[in-house]
Amino acid sequence: MSDFLLFLGRFHVVVLHLPIGMVLLTAIVHWLSRSARHNSLQQVLPVLWAFTALSALVTVVLGLLHFGEGGFSGPSVNAHRLWGIGFALAVQLVWFLSVFNVVLYQRWGGLLCAALLIAVTITGHYGGNLTHDPTYLVEYAPQSIRQFAGLDERRAPVTDLALADPWHDVIAPMLQSRCGSCHNPDKQRGQLDLSSLDALLVGGESGAVVLPGNAEGSDLYKRVTLPESHENFMPAEGKTPLTQEQVQILGWWLDAGLPAETSVSALSVDEETAALLSIELGLSPVPVMVAAENYPALPEDMINQMVASGWLVRPLTRESNGLSVSINAIGQPASRDMLALLNQASASMVELNLASTGLNDDLLAVITDMPVLEILNLSNNGITDAGLDTLAGFENLQVLNLYGNSAITDGGLEKLVSLVNLETLYLWGTAVSEAGLMGLQASMVDLEIYAQALPR
C-alpha cells in the first residue's frame, strides 16, 4: 500500500466521531418528528440520513486503509471491522428507505434508529480497545463485571513494599500505562505484546526484547533510554514516555532477572531502588541517606530564581537534595544569564538537560565545573569540537548525549578521554567517523557508545 493511502488512513481516528454524532442527531430528529408539534422535521430526515450514510462510508474506507498499515491483530480488530462495515451498510439501507420507501421507513424507523445506536456503540467499544487496550473500559469496574468480562480479580493496593510483586504490582502497571495502547493483544506494533510477562518474553518482530540479567542488552531498555528525538525512541508518536525514575526501575528489574510471582522482600534491593519502588507504588519512600548527605540543600530563594528565569528544577527523590534541571519550555533558547544561574547549583546538580536550547561553544563555556553532574544532555545544538573543552571539569559525568551536534568530529572525541567515569555516550547525527569511534572505544573499553557509524 502506498504511503499516501497510509497517510489518508491515519485520518480514520479523526473522522470516526462524525458518524457517531450524525446517527445520534438523526435519531433524535426522527423521534421528535413523530409528534404533531414537530412533524415538519420529517422533511429533513432524508438529508440527515444521507450525511450519516456518507460519513459512515468514508469512515469505513479510511479505517480499512488504516488497517493496511499493519500492527493490528486479535478479536477486537476483527470485531471492530465487521461491526463498522455492518453499521455503514445498515445506514445506507435506512437512508434508502427514508427516500424511496417512506411508508416502510415510518413503520420501522424507530426500531432501526435504536439498532443503529446499539451498533455504533459496540463498534466504538471495540475501537476503544485498539486505542487503549481490551480491558480499558472495565479496568475499574466492580469485580462482578470484571468476572463477566473474563478478567482476573483486581490486585489489592500495595501497602507494604516488602510484599509487593515486582512484575504484577510495579512493572506491569507501568508498561500498561505507557505502552499498553500500542502493545496489547489486539494492537501489536512491531508484533510486540506487553500485556503479560509471557507475551513480553515472546518478543516482537525483531526477536527478544528483554534479556534477563542484562538491562543494557535488552532492546526494550535501549528504546526507552534513547533521545526522545530519535526515530526508534519509545513510546512513539508523542505519547507520554516513562519517567526517569520508571526507567531506573525497569533497568533494575531487568538486571534482577525479571522477577515475578515473588516479593520485594525476597530480592536484594538497595536503598535507592527501594525508594524508587516506594514512590512508584505511592508509598512513603525509604530514606536514601547517602543521596541526602552527598548534596547540599540549595536555598529556596536560589531555586525560585532559577525557576523564574525559565528552568525546571526537580529533586531526584523526595529524600534527596540532588537536583535534575532542564529547560522549562521545550525548544526555548537558553540565554547567557540563564546558563550563569546553573553555576550556583553546581554542588547539587546531578542531571542537566540542555537539549535544543540553541547552545554554541561560547554559551556552553558559561557553565563552569559541575563536580557532581552525572547525566548531561546536549543534543540538537550547535556545539563544535572546541566546545567540548568545557566538559573537562565535569569529572563525575557518566552519561553524555551529543546527538545532533553535526560539527563534532573525531578531533572532539579526543577531549572525552579525560572523562574517566563516562559510561554511556550518544553520538548519532555528528560528523565522527568509524575510525574515530573505534579509536575512542579502544581508549575507553568500558564505554557504551551509540552512533550510526559504529559496527555492532
Image (cartoon, rainbow, N blue to C red):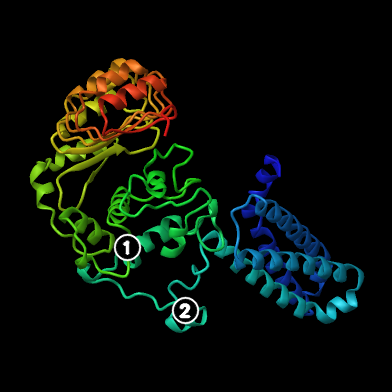
Which residue is depicted at the point 33% across and 39% down?
A: 328
Check if mark 1's residue and mark 2's residue have beta carbons within 8 Å. no
The kind of residue tagged 2 is: Arg
User: Where 263 falls versus 309 (above or below)?
Assistant: below
Q: Which residue is mark 1?
A: 170
When asked about the image quadrant of residue 331, the answer is top left
Which residue is depicted at the point 83% across and 65% down?
A: 46
Say whether residue 160 is left or right of residue 203: left
Give coordinates of residue 164: x percent, y percent. 26, 68
Say whether residue 9 is left or right of residue 204: right
Per the rendering, the mark at residue 146 is 2
Counting labels gives: 2
Most distant residue in the right direction: 100
Distance Cα–Cα, label 1 vs label 2: 21 Å
Say whether residue 206 is left or right of residue 72: left
Which quarter of the figure is the C terminus placed in?
Answer: top left
Per the rendering, the mark at residue 239 is none
